[in-house]
Every structure is written in C-alpha cells, then in structure tokens.
Image: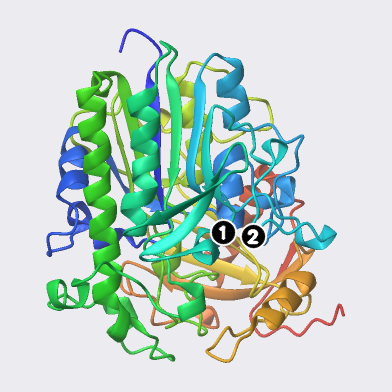
C-alpha cells in the first residue's frame, strides 16, 4: 500500500472464536472470514481486556484500560474530552464513519440515559462524517425489526434481519463516498449477543434446523451450572453465519468501488460467551470462554496467511490502527501495535492482562500455560445474574460496582496444558505456591503498566473486611 490505507473495523458482540472455521468450527459458518484469514493474519491467542460490552469498547476507542477512562461498567460513557482513535484519525485527514451499536454515550451515575435517544455529536467519540447508531442496539431492535439514529438525530426504522440492515448502512456509506480521503469505518454489530428483552439468541429464520448438528464446546459441559446453550447454540451459530455473509457483502462493495486493495480489514469481538455455565452469567469473569476472542487482520502488513501464536489483546488494536495510518500514538497509549507481534524480535509480552467488573471486581493474567485470577470479595461481593435477575437489580449492581482495590485475594489458578477447559482450580494446592508467587508478581507488573497501583495479594481463603 503506497498511500495511507482505508481501515474497516468489523466488531461482533459476544462471539466465541470457536464459532469460526479458521478456529476449528466444522460447520460452514465463516467461509468469507476463513478466506480472509488465509490471506492475512489470524491471531490464535487473542483475548479481551475486559469481558463486558461498554468497558471493552472504551478500550478499543482509547487504548487504555477502564481504570484510566472511568468506563469500568456498562452505562458509563466516554468523557467528551477523551482522546480517541477517531479523533486522531480525523485530525490526520481520514473520513470517520460509525455504524451500529455504540454503548459509550450514557452516563448512568449522572442520570444521562441515551438508550433510545439520538446521540449528540460530542458523545460520539470523534465519529463525525457518517454516523448511524444506537446506544444499545439490543434495546432498540430485535432480530427482525428495530431502529437507529443518524448523525442529525433522525430515527431510521429498518425491516429485515438486523445484521443485514446494519451492514446496509455501511454499504451505503461506501457506495456514496466521494472524497479521495482514506476512511476509517467502524461497524459494530450486536450479533451474536442475546436479545435482552426476550432472554434468548435470535438467529435468522431456519437456524435451528441448519445448525442443529453442531459439536458441543467442551467447556460448556459438566460445570456447576447447566446454562442455556442447548436451546440457543444453533441460533448463536446462525447469528455468526449472518455476520460472515455481511462481511462478504462489504468486501464485494469494496472491490466494486476499487477500494479493496488499499483497505485493511480487522475482524474481532468485544468478548466471548459461556451461556450461563459460569455463575449464571454469559461473561464478566475469568474463564477463556468469555475472555478468548477471534482476531483476524488482512491487508497492509497483515498478509501471508500467517497464524500468529503470540499472546495478544484487543487493547493492542488502537495503536495498531494508528500505526496503519502512520500516526504517532499519544504517550498514555502504552500498548504497542500488533505489527510488532509479527516481528521475531523476542520482545513481545508473554501474558495478557484483563480486568473484570460489574458482577465482581477482579484482575488476572493469561499466559500460554497458566490462568491466574484474583478478586476483591471484601470490596464487592460476587453477584449471580440468574433468570430472576431484574433491571432494577442490574442498576443497583452498577451503582455498587467498584473500579479498583488496594488488595485482592487469589481466586483461580488453571494449568491450561493439562486442563484446557478450566475444570480444576489449583489455587488452594500447596505444590503451586511458587507458581502463584511468580504469577502474582507478573500480574502486579501488568497492573502497573495499565496505570494501577500494585496491590497486596492474599492467598485464597483469606478473609478481609473492608466494608
């Protein structure tokens, strides 16, 4: 690419990487992405930095963890003065477009609720040239109906399957783009996230029949909670297939407009899903089923059909986007771009760091072999989000959620070489004392890099009373 590339960022919501053929799925769910992965780079060990929608999305826009942005739970939006990749790309001459779910405009603590309202320009994080959004798409639409708002506040109703309709707005932008400026187009789908008000996943018609012959992910079997995957997994896969079909639609548009060869495509998700088999929840904890995400990048330096096995996080994506556009990152964006992961220089971190919020307050690291997680039940007790959980209880949870702590208690240690589905917690076992001590040091180092103060970490079973 001789000139600055176009960048298309394609974000799914709550998608497990094992739904995709390039990550081992046997059903025909992702032929388009599989082909793209064969041309670009697939990251085999990609993880979210925060397994809940709003905080993860704030990280994607800023390159900073929630302790620095303040977006540590849903419904706390980006500060209007926050520096974002959209603002930086816009200042460098890019056209800036956003389509789909935003989830970063509301400010619950200050009674600013944007759930079903047009989002003011100052709350869109610098996306300015083409905007078709809903603050919470799962609350303004269903699988086959709904509405969004354009940048002038006009309500746009749609009829048809939601993924198709949201993509059509992105296609509309590409078809009508007239300037020679490069574009940054962020497409944020809600699929395959569950439909909140119906408490189920809404795949396109026929999903239950088309995808009934699926291979059950082993992490969903034999846990403390049965979960709801049996009734939902075919629809979940149907959602994922629709995401792939619409990625194909966008690629066809790029080719038709002569834009494809100079466009980098990034495909990822905000977090995964374990279908309420862990603590009655879909995400918001330390298990790989909600931390592990798909990540495929194709175009520019990301070529060759490479499968990169380095430990990476979506916290690396903002600097990756800026590096593609040849923009120097701000000093508080400390996580290096994924271009560096392709270089065999031995300097890449051997672990990823994640923060956990809402249902509990936790921190952890994931290496290729170990999963180590600590939590602060003395600051914020673990909350089970079962079928009796209400909107009122959810808002109470947000009010009571804590952003950080000066002390944590060891919660989990998993040896992923022998226990890849995280069934055997080793955190209480004496023979792993030295390993826990080493991982504790590494975790504290990661926390300091993220802008936190290194805490005191106590052994599992310690009783602390801070409140």
Toward the viewer: 418 or 316?
Answer: 316
Toward the viewer: 339 or 409?
Answer: 339
Toward the viewer: 157 or 128?
Answer: 157
Q: Secondary structure at mark 2?
A: loop
The numbered mark at residue 136 is: 1
Mark 1 in CB contact with mark 2 (< 8 angstroms): yes
Toward the viewer: 367 or 332?
Answer: 332
Residue 230 vs residue 406: left or right? left
Where is residue 50? Give x, y as percent. Answer: 56, 57
Question: In the image, what residue occupies the spot 17% across and 56% down?
Answer: 21
The numbered mark at residue 407 is: none
Where is residue 252? Give x, y as percent. Answer: 20, 33
Where is residue 417? Give x, y as percent. Answer: 31, 67
Q: Locate the C terminus and report the quarter of the image it occupies.
A: bottom right
Question: In the image, what residue occupies the spot 13% across and 72% down?
Answer: 210
The numbered mark at residue 115 is: 2
Residue 395 vs residue 4: left or right? right
Q: Secondary structure at mark 1?
A: loop
Precedes in sequence: disc 1 or disc 2: 2
């Amino acid at each position: 690419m001789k000139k600055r590339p176009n960048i298309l960022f394609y974000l799914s919501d709550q998608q497990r990487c094992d739904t995709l053929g390039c990550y081992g799925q046997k059903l025909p769910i992702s032929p388009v992405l599989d082909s793209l992965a064969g041309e670009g780079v697939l990251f085999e060990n990609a993880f979210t930095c925060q397994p809940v929608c709003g905080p993860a999305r704030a990280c994607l826009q800023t390159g900073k963890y929630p302790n620095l942005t303040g977006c540590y739970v849903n419904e706390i939006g980006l500060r209007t003065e926050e520096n974002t990749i959209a603002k930086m790309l816009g200042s460098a001459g890019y056209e800036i477009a956003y389509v789909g779910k935003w989830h970063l405009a509301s400010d619950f603590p200050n009674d600013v609720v944007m759930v079903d309202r047009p989002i003011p320009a100052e709350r869109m994080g610098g996306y300015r040239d083409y905007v078709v959004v809903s603050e919470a798409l799962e609350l303004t639409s269903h699988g086959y109906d709904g509405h969004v708002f354009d940048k002038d506040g006009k309500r746009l109703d749609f009829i048809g399957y939601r993924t198709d309709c949201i993509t059509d707005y992105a296609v509309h932008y590409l078809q009508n783009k007239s300037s020679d400026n490069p574009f940054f187009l962020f497409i944020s789908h809600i699929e395959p996230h569950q439909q909140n008000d119906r408490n189920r996943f809404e795949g396109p018609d026929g999903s239950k029949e088309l995808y009934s012959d699926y291979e059950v992910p082993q992490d969903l079997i034999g846990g403390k909670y049965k979960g709801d995957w049996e009734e939902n997994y075919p629809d979940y896969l149907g959602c994922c297939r629709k995401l792939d079909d619409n990625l194909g639609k966008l690629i066809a548009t790029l080719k038709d407009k002569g834009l494809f060869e100079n466009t980098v495509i990034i495909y990822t998700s905000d977090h995964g899903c374990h279908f309420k088999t862990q603590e009655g929840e879909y995400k918001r904890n330390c298990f790989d089923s909600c931390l592990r995400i798909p990540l495929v990048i194709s175009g520019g330096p990301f070529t060759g059909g490479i499968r990169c096995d380095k430990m990476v996080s979506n916290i690396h994506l903002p600097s990756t986007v800026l590096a593609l556009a040849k923009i120097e990152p701000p000093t508080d964006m400390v996580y290096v771009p994924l271009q560096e992961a392709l270089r065999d220089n031995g300097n890449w971190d051997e672990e990823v760091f994640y923060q956990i919020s809402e249902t509990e307050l936790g921190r952890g690291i994931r290496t290729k072999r170990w999963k180590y997680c600590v939590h602060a039940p003395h600051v914020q007790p673990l909350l089970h989000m079962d079928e009796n959980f209400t909107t009122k209880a959810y808002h109470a949870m947000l009010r009571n959620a804590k952003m950080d702590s000066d002390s944590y208690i060891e919660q989990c240690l998993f040896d992923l070489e022998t226990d890849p589905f995280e069934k055997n917690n080793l955190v209480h076992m004496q023979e792993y004392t030295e390993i826990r001590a080493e991982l504790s040091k590494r975790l504290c180092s990661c926390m300091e890099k993220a802008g936190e103060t290194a805490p005191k970490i106590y052994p599992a079973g310690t009783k602390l009373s801070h409140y």
